[in-house]
Image: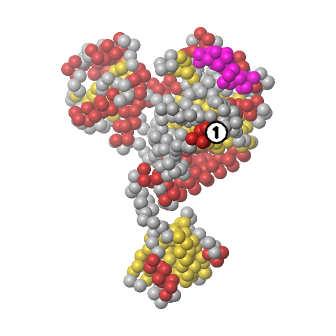
Amino acid sequence: MPWQWRRTHTCGGLTKQDAGSTVTLVGWVANQRDHGGVIFADLRDRYGVTQVVFHPEGDAAVLETARRIKSEWAVGIRGKVRLRPAEMVNPRLSTGAIEIEAEQCEIFNESGILPFQIKDPCDATDETRLKYRYLDLRRPQMQRNLTLRHRAAKTVRDFLDSQGFLEIETPILMKSTPEGARDYLVPSRVHKGRFYALPQSPQIYKQTLMISGFDRYFQIVRCFRDEDLRADRQPEFTQIDAEMSFVTEDDILPIMEELTRRLFAEFRNIRLPNPFPRMGYDEAVSRYGTDRPDLRFGMEITDISAAAERSGFRVFEEAVRSGGAVRGIRLEAAGPVSRKQTDDLTEYVKGFGAKGLVVLQRTETEWLSPIVKFTTPEFLAAAGEALSMKAGDAAFIVADKAKTCGEALGSLRKKLAADRGLIPGDAFAPLWVTDFPLLEWSEEEGRWAAMHHPFTSPREEDIPLLETDPGRVRARAYDLVVNGSEIGGGSIRNHRKSVQESLFRSLGMDRETAERRFGFLLEALEFGAPPHGGIAFGFDRLVMLLAGEESIREVIAFPKTTSALSLMDGCPSEVSEDQLKELGLKITE
């Protein structure tokens, strides 16, 4: 671009104080309007929009150029800033009090036929948006989101720097340590038959940094997991990763709370509570059916097994006798629940493993439900009292294994709240969930697996149970949940080699396997490793909440689809036989 077209101002920077100035603007044509001689164009860049006017008495060549320009052409404008007539001021724009009277217009590049209009909201499909992501990113909403992401990262860095944390980079090519999600593997050309892995997190490296004497570390870091995707999950994602030495949970959590409060205050003008409430894992699962409870609305799960055991209804009684449970949620002022609604909700809970759903409604004079004729009045009274039911309320009841009841009702609770408009859109409810089980049984693998990761410390008093009763061991772990979304998770780590080895044995890992996978960490723990712990925030999820979006794809510049495809550049793609040969690889059917 010739030097004379270097901009003097952005398209969002001019105000009425600039009236009379000669300025140069560059950007994209948002639209062009020919009003029978006078031509208007809106020029846009990431800073805003400025209206440009071309008068018929002006330079004929400039006017002819103005007639040609179309949406998304890249152009330059030079002219004088004029105040708009009072009746034409646009209060919705920061530049709405002025316009540019064009004296020169340069076309830098034309645009082809657009696959969709560059406007908010976008009416294109997600697939089209991702294929033409460079156009989608021109939309003001996307530019606001990525600007917010940049500023949020700066806030994080400034805050953690003020707390004495050092930002230290860790390797992207690392050793594969399969324990959890699948690794993305990178073949070595120099050492054929050997592979690097892309990090699922910097976990082992940040623990090593603690052993190295860097007592406060952080990093805004890219991580990679080869797992099934959804709206809030991508194969490559970003974490705010932090670790501290010589600390307990009560040192880590307040600092991370303050960081979260600052972000929400700065970018949402929301004052979060101080301190955040805390809830144990067992209580969260019992009351909400999940370890990620959304506290913005009620409808807590209530156990009515004691009443159901003598209800007269065979399904309820057999569920309790077989070691299961009967649990329900109350929807206040539900109004009549139709048979079709009941059938639809029954199919919904079956998707979570439940065998069925009972809907119990209360009116001023009677109980309404297909099971009423099979149950006793005493059960209806006891269940209604336990669920705090009043006239007009409805209860949704599941009889099954306790875990199935929780998962089905926990999901139904969120669905009913969303369908009935019970979730306030401008409310944010943070919560620390603590006291997780250290291990959970994997039916698929027939062994104990780490609920978080295999470096989490057990509660001190539970360490002897690692060898005798692993399922009862509690973890020194904590998750930060906001509005039902886990945005951060961490733990106190094992700093003693003996405890780490005991945990590996509980996971079914023999000494040889542990040494092969984690030998350098086990060795490092023998050299004065300090007590340490940390946390990782899902930065994409955090920015998603700050931006008021429903998917992390709206706050990532170049995301992939739910099948891990990049529609814009076509990856993953095939590579040549020569490349495979150089790496010592061969593709088989």
* Direction from residue 221 to residue 90 in the image, left or right: left
Is 211 a magenta residue? no
Q: Is residue 461 above or below residue 483?
A: above
Instruction: Give the crowd class for mark 1: few <14, some 14-19, many >=20 residues within 10 Å.
Output: few
Residue depicted at 57% across the width and 56% down the height:
147
Residue depicted at 77% across the width and 36% down the height:
214
**Occupied quadrant, residue 434:** top right
Q: Residue 386 in the image: x percent, y percent? A: 36, 24
Q: Is residue 369 visible?
A: yes
Highlighted range, magenta:
500-523
Dot 1 amino acid type: Glu
Q: Is residue 43 above or below residue 144?
A: below
**Occupied quadrant, residue 462:** top right
Q: Is residue 94 visible?
A: no
Which residue is nearer to you in this view: 37 or 322? Answer: 37
Q: Residue 470 in the image: x percent, y percent? A: 57, 15
Is 506 a magenta residue? yes
Dominant SS of magenta comes to: helix
- Secondary structure of the residue carrying numbered label 1: helix
Q: Residue 178 in the image: x percent, y percent? A: 60, 27
Residue depicted at 34% across the width and 42% down the height:
420
* Direction from residue 306 to residue 270 in the image, left or right: right
* Direction from residue 195 to residue 560 in the image, left or right: left
Residue depicted at 53% across the width and 81% down the height:
102
Type of colouring: secondary structure
Which residue is nearer to you in this view: 241 or 314? Answer: 241
Quadrant the N terminus occupies = bottom right
Residue identifier under label 1: 582
Residue lying farthest to the top in this orientation: 468
Q: Residue 118 in the image: x percent, y percent? A: 45, 62
* Direction from residue 553 to residue 365 in the image, left or right: left
